[in-house]
Amino acid sequence: MQPSPTLSLKTVYIGAPTPTRTPASPSTIASPSPTSTPTPTQSLYDQAVTVYQVFFEEQAKALMAGGAETLPPALSATLVGDASRLVTALLQFTLEQGHHYVGDPEFQLVWVRPSTDKPAEAVVGLEACEEITGGIMVDRDDVPLDQTDRNAYVYRAYFQHGDYGNLVIYDLSGERVDSCPA
């Protein structure tokens, strides 16, 4: 399920919403990382990694904020179609249910790899493994929704060209895993 090569990306440190409102720490980028702005000579895969990195960071911020009624603009710019509807529904559900993190969660994009099973309509596909450590998601009554403060997820994202030629995620799926496999 996890082809190579592996590109280790970034860790996003975000302070949990606590009564003291811990401020967010800056993001750190591990080498190698893709170019931040896609260029005409940059490979489609590298462009997809860049878009996914923005998606990852913006979704983490929205989850830390306790969800959202609508997609924040920076997150919306990375999604179309079913992927946009899925993430919107997730963030709305999170908001409506009062789900939020306690502790000091760290969102880490452990690796990103090319997908081996890209649908014909996709320009490019990738797989990513993400970990959330140091915080537990709870409901509005502070009842834990997770049994541990270490959760890992493997996602598959497929990209198409957007209205302006930019890559956007149009199909997104994933599942919880015990850990990010090598």
Image (tube, rainbow, N blue to C red):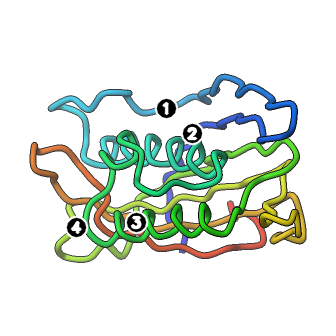
What residue sits 40% from the left and 52% below the top? Answer: 71
- Can you give x and y, in whole percent of width and height, for residue 58 in the image? 50, 43
Q: Residues within 10 Å of mark 1 (few under 14, many from 20)?
A: some
Q: Which residue is mark 2?
A: 9
- Can you give x and y, in whole percent of width and height, for residue 145 in the image? 81, 71
What residue sits 65% from the left and 36% below the top? Answer: 12
Q: Which residue is mark 1?
A: 33
- Cα gap from disc 1 to disc 4, whole angstroms: 23 Å
Secondary structure category for the residue under label 4? loop
Q: Between label 3 and label 4, give the one nearer the viewer.
A: 4
Sequence order check, earlier mark of 1 and 4? 1
Q: Residues within 10 Å of mark 4 (few under 14, many from 20)?
A: some
Looking at the rendered structure, the kind of residue marked 1 is Ser
Secondary structure category for the residue under label 3? loop
Tell me, for residue 115, which label it has, or none.
3
Looking at the rendered structure, the kind of residue marked 3 is Ser
Tell me, for residue 5, which label it has, or none.
none
- Cα gap from disc 2 to disc 4, whole angstroms: 23 Å
Q: Which residue is mark 4?
A: 122
- Can you give x and y, in whole percent of width and height, for residue 93 in the image? 57, 70
Looking at the rendered structure, the kind of residue marked 2 is Leu
- Cα gap from disc 3 to disc 2, whole angstroms: 16 Å
Sequence order check, earlier mark of 3 and 4? 3
**Quadrant of the image containing the C terminus:** bottom right
Sequence order check, earlier mark of 3 and 2? 2
Q: Quadrant of residue 9?
A: top right
